Amino acid sequence: MWCIAALTKEYRQRMYHLLALYLRPLRSDEPVVCIDEKSLQLLAHSRTPMPIKPGRLRKEDYEYVRRGTRNLFVAVEPKAGRRNVVVTDRRGKSDFVAFVQHLLETTYRTARRLHLVLDNLNTHFEKSFIDVLGSRQAAKLLRRVRFHYTPKHASWLNMAEIEIGVLTRQCLNTRFAAGDALQRSVQAWQRRRNEQRKPIIWSFTRQKADAKLRRHYVS
C-alpha cells in the first residue's frame, strides 16, 4: 500500500465491484476471465552451459547475449481453472485486440458474454477495438464483452497476476534464446495446467477489505 496516497471513493467502488464479480458462481455462458501481460527478454548463452552430471547441477555462465524481447498475453478463468497464453512480438493495441478475438473465437466461442478483468493500460479500452477493427466490426465483437477495470495502482486485484507468478516460476525460470523455443515451452505449460484444471481460490472479500484497509479510506 506504500505507493497509494489515499483510497478514494473511485478506488473503493472499483475494488468492491471486482470483489462482487469474483463471488459470482461459475457460469459457462458468462465466464469471468482475468487478463494481463508480461514482457520477457530473450537471452542466449555466451558460453555453452556445463551439463548435469551425477552429483553436479547444470551450470550457466552469468554472461548472456540479448536477443530481443517477447510479450506474453495471459488469460485465466479462475473458477474453471482454464488458462490461455499467447506469445507476441509486441503488446500494442492490435495485439491486444487479436488476443481478445482469439479468446472469443476459440475457448469461449459458445459464451454469450465474456467478463474481462483488466488493468488500466491504454490499450485495454474500447477505443483500441474501434481503431483496429473499425466501428461496425468493433461493435459486433464488443456486444459479447464486458470490461471490468481494477482501481489505479491496484493490479493486485487482477488474478491474472497470480497466474503470471506461477507461469514465471514453473516455465520462465530459464533462458530462452529464440521466440519459437519460448512458444513451445509456454504451450506445453499451458497444456499441463489446463489438464490439471486447478482453480484460483480467491478469499479476499469486501468485508476483509474494509477490515484491512479502512484506515486508508478517504471519506
Image (tube, grey):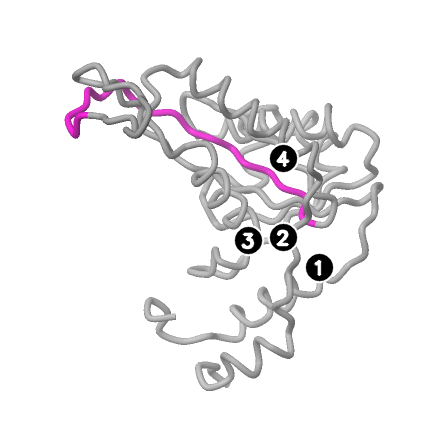
Extreme residue in the front direction: 54
- Compare marks 1 and 3 and give the one earlier in the sequence: 1
Q: Amino acid at mark 3?
A: Asn
**Up/down of 13 relative to 161, above or below:** below
Secondary structure category for the residue under label 4: helix
Read off the residue under disc 1: 21
Label 4 with label 2: CB-CB less than 8 Å = no
| Label of residue 148 in the image | 2
Name the quadrant containing residue 91.
top left
On screen, 35 above or below 24? above
Mark 4, mark 3: which one is toward the viewer? 4
The quadrant where residue 35 appears: top right
**Is residue 64 part of the magenta span, yes or no?**
yes
Reading the image, the residue beneath label 4 is 193
Task: Tell me where residue 147 appears, x and y as whole percent.
Answer: 64, 47
C-alpha gap between disc 1 and disc 3: 11 Å
Q: Earlier in the sequence, mark 4 or mark 3?
A: 3
Question: Does dot 1 land on a helix, a strand or a loop?
Answer: helix
Residue 184 lies, in percent from the top left, at 50, 17
The quarter of the picture where residue 42 lies is top left
Of the two numbered discs 1 and 4 on the same chain, state the one appearing first in sequence.
1
